[in-house]
Amino acid sequence: MAKRIAVVGAGMGGLCAAIKAREAGHEVVLYEHADSVGGTWRANRYPGIACDVPAILYQFSFAPNPHWSHHYARGPEIHAYTQSLVEQFGLGEVLHLNEGVARATWDEGARQWQVETETGAREAFDAIVPALGQLSRPQLPEIAGRDDFAGTMFHAAQWPDGLDLTGKRVGVVGSAASAVQLIPEVAKVAGHLTVFQRTPNWVVPRNDQAVTPEAKALMATNIDVAMKLGASQRAMIFDQADTFSWQAFQWTPEGRAAFTRTALDHLAAQVADPALRAKLTPDYPVGCKRILICDDFYPTLCRDNVTLETAGIARIEAGGVRTADGFHDLDVLIFATGFETTEWNWSMEVVGKGGVSLKEAWKDGPEAYLGIMVHGFPNMFMLYGPNTNLGHNSISFMIEQQVAFMLRTLAAVEADDAQAAEVSADGQRRFQEGLAQKLSGTVWADPHCRSWYKAANGRIYQNWSGNCADYAEATGTVDREVLAIA
């Protein structure tokens, strides 16, 4: 019997879930609080935004896009890709824009989820799919005087429409993933740019290339062959990442040596000044933090109108930023300081069996079986949940595996003439113990490694413990010793 499923969030994960659940014959309602689909690619509009995963991987296997402009897709065209999925798969008829979910409550008597939206509407569903992402809640650092700044100040994920930085004195706090993309663009127009760096990052070359109109036209002459070649290329790049790139995080001697050498050579080739090079050389192992993939960040720091400031910020004042070694006059202050990643403060409240909220269940830290299911929350299937993040490959692959697991589980529920599936407490505990054991052998477990991948207590809440092939195998079957179906 087909299930009625509420998918919450219309980013990449929610779109995949809605498409595949409908193909499997289920009734779907797709809720999105914003006025457009796309998730992070809708919300983030800073100049230079792009994906640091090759475009051929950062798309769904069932919806290849032959129109990418570069090997690494730009943010606006990824947003356009998500919008195209709505049209291609007819999601418009089930998509509720400007209507997020405020609360979902498990009704044990009815064996259903009662969903209340932000508009006050209430509906019952057999299953819910929270697809709210890990990187959607901007984080501002606690710096003294932050609210005293008299100029224009904002987080990079909340870039103002129509902002003109021409000739302005601009400060960027942060030098990681978002920063290395926006800094080269800001430097082109700013009168002066000061980059406030707390910790340098390991950076490897992107070697990006534009896909020329002629190349696109050539591929269009035989689209069937082009698609076959694309699938073959995708498989090759995927296997290379899953086999070799993963070793930088698995912490093999070969992996860490190869990636360290690549990053140091990239730095040496692009930064001639030894003093600046020293400021940009990390003192922690490669892979500990997110490895950045960029061609133009280092050259930007060598520009005459750019200063790299590594002295700690003492406080923010009305006219700028005061560091340990001086004052920096600024007109605009941009925080490229990432997102809240370990608290998992969802925009919706979820209440499971016995009136226990997900926030209560996660009071000691978020955990989920396969990053998808949580004990006490029947027929709830998270996408991009705890311990499903990657440092070496594409999250779109992980999302497809999670959606496939959800559909297998619901098929098992139907085969048993049952109503719901729930991970057992023991099954979830054993999974977490095995996960922790595997993670203990990765670079993230290094006691000197501090990153957004793990919390202050040292637990790694974000990342998967193996490569993508491991995850596909783990999610490939429904384990009846772990899942209770009734």
Image (cartoon, grey):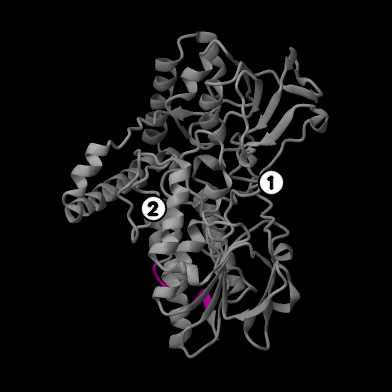
Q: Where is residue 455 in the image (x, y as percent from the top left)?
A: 66, 46
**Residue 213 falls left or right of residue 328:** left
Residue 59 shows which numbered tag? 2
Is 479 inside the magenta-drawn segment? yes
Say few, some or many: other residues with alpha carbon within 10 Å of mark 2 (under 14 / 14 to 19 / 20 or more). Answer: many
User: Is the residue under label 1 in contact with that under label 2 (CB below 8 Å)?
Assistant: no
> At 49% from the left edge and 36% from the top edge, which residue is drawn?
287
The local secondary structure at tag 2 comes to loop
Examine the rendered structure and indicate whether residue 214 appears above or below residue 120. above
The local secondary structure at tag 1 comes to loop
Examine the rendered structure and indicate whether residue 483 appears above or below residue 266. below
Does residue 349 appear in the picture of this structure?
Answer: yes
> At 79% from the left edge and 24% from the top edge, which residue is drawn?
315
* Of 377 and 167, the residue lying toward us: 167
> At 64% from the left edge and 36% from the top edge, which residue is drawn?
337
* Of 434 and 192, the residue lying toward us: 192
Residue 125 shows which numbered tag? none
Examine the rendered structure and indicate whether residue 75 appears above or below residue 33. above
**Residue 131 falls left or right of residue 149:** left
Q: In which quarter of the image is the C terminus?
A: bottom right
Q: Where is residue 341 in the image (x, y as percent from the top left)?
A: 63, 48
Q: Name the residue under label 1.
A: 457
Tell which circle, 2 or 1, labels the residue nearer the N-terminal end.
Answer: 2
Q: Where is residue 134 in the image (x, y as percent from the top left)?
A: 58, 52
Q: Which amino acid does label 1 sit on?
A: Asn
From the image, give the main secondary structure of the stretch colored magenta. Answer: loop
Q: Give the range drawn in magenta.
A: 476-483
